Image (cartoon, rainbow, N blue to C red):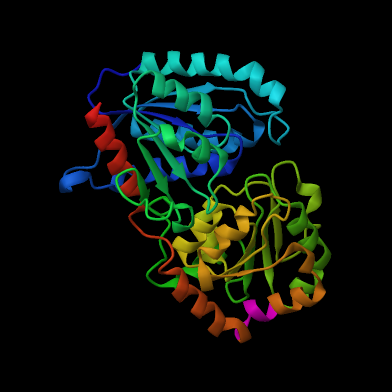
Amino acid sequence: MASQGGGLRLAIAGGGTGGHVVPGLHLLDSLQEVIGRAGGPAPHLDDLLWFHSGRRAEERCLKELDRQVGSMGVDLERVILPLEPDGGGAPSLVRLSQRMVPSFFNARKAMREHRSQVFLGLGGYTTAPAALAARALGIPVVLLEINATAGKATRTLGPFSQRVLHAWRETLPPDREGEKHQLVGPPVARRFAPPADPDGARRGAKDDLGFDPDRPLLLVLGGSQGAKGLNAFVRNHVSYLLGSGVQVLHQVGPGRRAEGADSLDGYEAIEFMDDVYTALVAADGVLCRGGASTLAEIGAMETPAWVVPYPHHGDQHQVRNARQLSGGVRIIEEQDLDHARCEELVRFLGAPGAEERERMRHHLREAVPADAAQRVWTELEELALVR
């Protein structure tokens, strides 16, 4: 049952992949330091209702949600709206037609019971029935477009929403910035800020993670589900990397440990990275996909990166995401991940690449605004007060 307190009563829809969950986790993490509108105290979250798809890919992220909310003393209920197939990929039209209406009624029932004041959609198919249910109840609808290409949820539901918040200027409609469409930046958790002494912190973080503080460290991030192309590149070239003095911390993806390399001194493969912050502090450079949340964290931490966008997205949104970081990242096509590129990567991570890495850090300082989460919370609070 919903709490009887007087704080914000929020409903969120986000699930299917980590990319549709992590921005919400960042928002919750940032809540303690958000300054409310008019300079007052931070808004107090009293009740949280979270709709998700029930896919296995969400499990680790949603465990973090349970931990976060539990530490805040907030009432939480998670409700599954099973539109998306558990094995991944987009749902078929048959599946959507069978499950959209029941999902709508389940979402409406839950929001009525929780007396939700405002709804936030993070994208993915789960957002659609929940947003329509909020609309039917007269609850203000807010969409957060985290990618640099507007997704289906934003394109379809935008006209019915009170606010569309954009992480990147790329998706902001021309001449439409104003009360409804607002550029807020990608929200990141409050801990994602570069340390005051980056070199000293980097050495300490390497030591904490079990790596040699005196050798460069490459961090490989394949996203919440891993990346087959990045895994193959590392597996095929790990001997050369290690022989050249480069250490590797390799996130391979859940259930994909076999795609990594054998256990070697200076190489560690893990399926899921619980502490991305420490890994980014420790890394001299990152090799990653172009997921919006990953790039927001990289930008906020000012960690130079080579971005290898997933090549099979029709809208190429990972390429567009990477372009938002301008000179702070280098974009590499997956087909170009060969031995010559590996040699170049070794130079980049070592002393010859120090000047380029510093230039990239300088560009990243301007890429991700520090107050993005504050802007989102301010909009949610204002709309809740209107209701």
Question: Up-down: is 259 above or below 71?
Answer: below
Question: Up-down: is 328 above or below 49?
Answer: below
For the point 58% across and 42% down, the residue is 18
Question: Up-down: is 60 above or below 209?
Answer: above
Residue 194 appears in the picture as rendered:
yes
For the point 65% across and 19% down, the residue is 97
Coordinates of residue 100 in the picture (x, y in percent)? 59, 20
Coordinates of residue 55 in the picture (x, y in percent)? 64, 30
Magenta stretch encompasses residue 87: no
In which quadrant is the C terminus drawn? top left
Coordinates of residue 293 in the picture (x, y in percent)? 52, 51
Of 304 and 239, the residue lying toward us:
304
Of 176 and 261, the residue lying toward us:
176
Decide whether the magenta segment is chiefly helix, strand or loop: helix
Residue 199 appears in the picture as rendered:
no
Q: Which residues are magenta?
A: 346-351
Coordinates of residue 304 in the picture (x, y in percent)? 55, 70
In which quadrant is the N terminus drawn? top left
Magenta stretch encompasses residue 348: yes
